[in-house]
Amino acid sequence: MQIQTATLGYPRIGKNREVKKALEAFWSGKLESEALLQTIKEVEETNWKIQLEAGIDKIGVGDTSLYDHVLDWMFRFGLIPERFQQFSGLECYFVMARGKEGIAALEMTKWFDTNYHYLVPEIAEKTLSADFSDFLERVCRAQKILGNRAIPIVLGPCTLLRLSKLEPNIDIDKIVSKLIPLYINLLTDLKNLGVEEVQMHEPALVLGDANSWKEHFQTAYNSFSSVGLPLNLVTYFDDLGETYPWVIELPVSAISLDFTRGRNLEFIKNYGFPQDKRLGVGIVDARNIWQIYPEKVLPILQEIVLTLHGTSLHIQPSASLQFVPDDAKREKQLPLQLRNVLSFAEQKLQEVIFLARTITGENTQVEQDFLESNWSKFEQFSPANQSVQGRLKTLNIADFQRSLSYGLRLDSQIPLPLFPTTTIGSFPQTSEVRQLRVRYKRSELSQEAYQAAIDVQIADSIKLQEELGLDVLVHGEFERTDMVEFFGQQLSGFAFTENGWVQSYGSRYVRPPIIYGDVVRTAPMTVREFKVAQSLTEKPVKGMLTGPVTILNWSYARTDISRQEQAFQIALALRDEVADLEAAGAKVIQVDEPALREGLPLKHQRWSEYLSWAVDAFLLATAVAQPQTQIHTHMCYCEFGDIIKDIERLDADVISIENSRSNNQTLREITEAGYTHQVGNGVYDIHSPVVPTTEQILQQLQTGIANLPMKQIWVNPDCGLKTRRWSEVIPSIKNMVEAAKVLRVSVNATPK
Ligand code: GLN
Ligand code: ZN
């Protein structure tokens, strides 16, 4: 049996966010394109050397990107939608990514169930003209440094198409047959360069509908086999599901599977694996930041080896390492016990090597003991919190239910005019506000001075909201950098990195918090600002919280306890906050869950299990509220048709949603489902700087009235306003309030 090590991609933003800096300088005209491209080269060459020095045998290359790897392949295959064809070269690439006056960028959406966003290809029926020169040039450079360890990473044709938007009436077979010869050209060019193998990334194989793509996969891969270049068919993020039996028969030399999620191990045991193919064993979790537990991982690996005796194996991360930061050793401010069990990209390379050496029988006992002792030191450092554990054990059905049902509690809630107006929570984060937080963080401002300055912002915003005539006010979230980080920093059990950046999209990077221990609220988190705001007005001010599912989904989670348990722990902390806000006089409390939907598992059959605990977590956080307290939730999307029952089960009195870009499809779905609670159907798009007119907002509201009983309708923008300027916000809200007033008059004038 031959055992080697491999990688499927590496963090591509640079150790010190070089790519972001270069991109932003380039966009603002301060950097030439040559210098930008040079930065990318340096980042990728550094990456190659790190992987080479770590001793990886087969190093994935070609995944570094100026913006997004899906865009890169679209571009190389000449899949340029018509509106961009007037541009060429880099300009065209960036207009596709970011748009330009009057030319909409490509749509962006989440890459499978990760928090990375890719650009959605739009495919029209036209001749493609491919140009792979940039990719081939990279591969050549990689070969100079890595020799035959350089394994090009190519996005497979079926995944590329599966993730695309096809023009109506387009014949997918035709597109496949146009793409195949282009792929063959690419593979032939790569073969001529002397590469030993190519990774064809086809994560679409783990999606629930992959079986319906069987023929396309067979056609494509049968054609590719004519090139005579060994292909590694790479899948990740879940198991192959029902496609397993035919996927393993495709004419490729290797298949890579994810063994950190799903049931691939079971499939191998039940169906076997062809002797003549190599198996890529994705066993080091590329989606999380924890060091492996040898006692958990080694038995799985041994089982694979035993089942497949004789088959060649590659030990590798489960996916590209782009989903984890670069190097945990740099996080010097984190306690050593925690830092020692963190594993970012560099550490994961070491783990891959360790696992391969253990399997080949090399003596790695010393490393194994070391890893295990790291974990035992960590366990002493972060012991279970008895109080939260105890609370979780004694939960009962009543804890997940409001004490009165919606119909019965409704009349006791705060009286409001028809079509109540409100905003989603945040107001513009001006540079003045950001400066305040920075200076406070650097201890240049005392806590008193900082809070006093925040209170001035709150007071100004309350005054403004009163002048604008809004019905339900917000304090403005000036004290929050980020809706998850703000809560994480006040809860025990969360850690924050200094350099742990991962790409969210393009030049936007995030530093996800790490949940490392039981989550406990040690003090009220939002009550002070709420009280300040409420003391300044007779109008109701909303208490404003981020929901448990969103906090969990936007963090790196623990792996020693279930996600459900972590969501419930966070929910208990929020539950106490809801009770405290209520005690402080809040009549309206909003709990945002923008990440609830994106946490849905890739395979439909696992949705109900997730939704069951996710909705329970929201209920656990909110059901403590008195019947008189109006609970709001907010979600920045509107695809509810398939989860409307779960949305109903949240039992929020009011839900505000993004709906200004979806042709009111959601409203129709909500209506058809017979949704009885109140809905704030976002009346304008906050992602655009354009100020909506009263007319436009009225029109949007008219659709609302046509679909839902008037009593159910709220009037609000479709998301928070923190990314906008005051000069956009003020006239927009003014028009919004005006539209509500006009509507009130007009419906009162119309006999019912
Ligand atoms: N309350 C948050 C805000 O207004 C909601 C943000 C979000 O939905 N992503 O900023
Ligand atoms: Zn939103």
Image (cartoon, grey):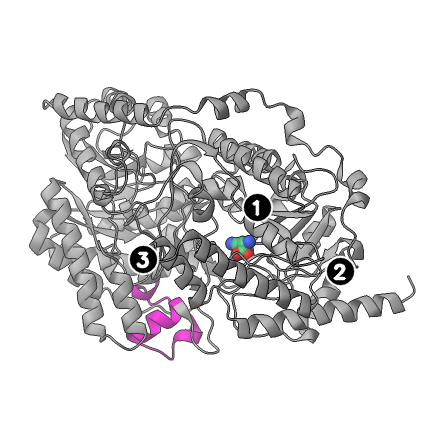
Position of 42 with respect to 404 (left or right) is left
* Magenta residues, dominant SS class: helix
> Alpha-carbon neighbours of circle 1 within 10 Å: few (<14), some, or many (≥20)?
many
* Residue 698: quarter of image: bottom right
At x 23% / y 27%, what residue is drawn? 374
Find out whether residue 344 is within the magenta segment: no
Residue 241: % across, % down: 42, 34
Give whichever of discs 2 and 1 has the lower sequence position.
2
**Observer-nearest residue: 678 or 729?**
729
Q: CA distance from mark 2 to mark 1?
A: 28 Å
User: Callout 2: helix, strand or loop?
Assistant: loop
Secondary structure of the residue carrying tag 3 is helix
Location of mark 3 (residue)? 69
Residue range highlighted in magenta: 73-97
* Residue at 41%, 42% in the rendered image: 555
**Of the pair 749 and 709, the residue shown nearer to us:** 749
Residue on which the image places disc 1: 527
Q: Amino acid at mark 2?
A: Phe
Circle 3 packing at 10 Å, graded few (<14), some (14-19), many (20+), is: some
Earlier sequence position, callout 3 versus callout 2:
3
